[in-house]
Image (cartoon, grey):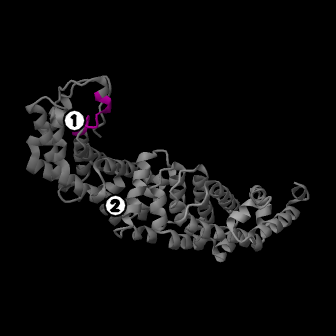
Amino acid sequence: MAAAAAGPEAALRALAQRLGLAARAERLSEASSAPGCLETVRRLTGLFREARPREMAEESMFQSLLKILTKASCEMELTCKDSMELTTLDTCLLLIAECFRCLRNACVRCARNQDVMRNLGLIEVSVHLIQLLHGLEVEKESLFAALRCSLQFLGNLAAGNGDSQNSIWKCAFPDLFLNCLNHHDEKIITYSCMVLFTCLNSEKVRELLEHKNLNIALAVLKVYRKQLESEWSFLIVTDHLLKCPELVKVMYAKLSNQERITLLELIMAKISERNSMTSDEMAVLLKDVEFLASVFQEKCRDVLKLTSAANTEDEEAIVTIRLLDVLCEMTSNNEQLEHLQTCPGLLETAVDTLQLTHLAGKQTTNIFTATHSMTGEEEISHPAVGFKSHLIRLIGNLCYKNKENQDKIMQCLGQRLSSVIIQCLTQWSPSPSPQPPVQ
């Protein structure tokens, strides 16, 4: 405490000397049990919360931390083969976690320290150590703390530093991300998402198209489904994955129906941001929606499964409903509308589906029956409510200021379709809650 009282520069010098002595120990277990070693690193961690000490830190201090973590890697390798005593392991894990906390704090908004750490080889040593820690078959809070702090360190090291991002990607992709995204500790998952988001760019996203690497994209979506408040997984999907239409297609084919619903909800969230998108970003999103339009055309009849009382929660049918939601939302904007109005067969599919669901509702009493009586809860919650009105909305959007589509309606479908639309709008039974808008 006396060193700290003398000012940050003197405190750093004194702590650096103590840290250097601890780093000379032959084994990590010796360093971690050395008098004051853990406390020395803790004091450094505290000092590095402030910008001035971070700026004054010397390379020798990071070299000492590198030596300690290198010894940690050696001992963890031995631990994986021959079990270390739990008390010794606990002590070592506490020191490892504190070293990572210290490094994490030291590179906050400090490009110089980020570069020094990268050039010293701290990324390679850290990633190797993380993989070794992941392989320990013990359930200890000290182990989780070490993993969390190590990932936070990599996240801070990568922040705003392209060279560090590339180095981390080279060392950590794909194995470290796969291991950490599939961990059962929520904080470890969250911090691994943070590192992944920080390192990703358009070129790296394309690497996810490779067979083994695709599991990372799928794991991110699973994380979002489990942790709906996880901002990092949300941003990975909306800011990176959705910007690669080829990846969206490959992912969609691999997803379960529940996961597809989640992906479609994220696409809806992205569409809602369209006013702030660049023209290039919107062009990419249009490619995603074109693909979804083709899926809707292929799977639209799945919605008829809902006519059976036994299939009112059919997941394939719910996916079809969500696909229609996306198409309605995307065609409600004039700038994107013209592009989607020319999608081959989309208008015809929407009309056919409207006629089929209307007919199905007349043949038996079901979710598509105009006079179908539902409970208040079902009225609000069932995703099929308003499906026919959404189809009418899509048809109307596809015909808006488009003479070719208008002529198709009048010449080929004319009176038959008009009759269906009129019945849908006039026979819909009144209810306590309003129906979704037609336009």
**Residue wearing tag 1:** 312
Identity, as a three-letter code, of the amino acid under mark 1: Thr
x and y, in percent, of residue 103 in the image: 68, 63
User: Which residue range is magenta in the image?
Assistant: 378-388
Give left or right: position of 350 versus 127: left
* Residue 346, label in figure: none
Q: Is residue 276 among what the camera can see?
A: no
Task: Write the residue at 22% across / 50% down.
Answer: 399
Is tag 2's residue or tag 1's residue first in the polypeptide sequence?
2
Secondary structure state at the residue bearing disc 2 = helix
Q: Where does the C terminus fall, quadrant-wise?
A: top left
x and y, in percent, of residue 321 in the image: 26, 44
Task: Write the residue at 67% across / 73% down.
Answer: 115
Identity, as a three-letter code, of the amino acid under mark 2: Val
Q: Which of 237 and 40 is in front in this view?
A: 40
Whether 377 is drawn above or below 24: the answer is: above
Q: Nearer the viewer, residue 29 or 381?
A: 29
Give left or right: position of 112 versus 370: right
**Residue wearing tag 2:** 248
Task: Write the residue at 71% across / 60% down.
Answer: 102
Task: Judge whether residue 381 is colored magenta.
Answer: yes
x and y, in percent, of residue 83 in the image: 56, 61
For label 2, the crowd category at 10 Å Cα-Cα, with few meaning under 14, some 14 to 19 and many 20 or more, is: many
Secondary structure state at the residue bearing disc 1 = loop
x and y, in percent, of residue 152 in the image: 60, 58
Nearest-to-viewer mark from 2 and 1: 1
Q: Is residue 140 among what the camera can see?
A: yes
Task: Judge whether residue 250 is colored magenta.
Answer: no
Q: Nearer the viewer, residue 361 or 262?
A: 262
Task: Write the residue at 73% across / 65% down.
Answer: 31
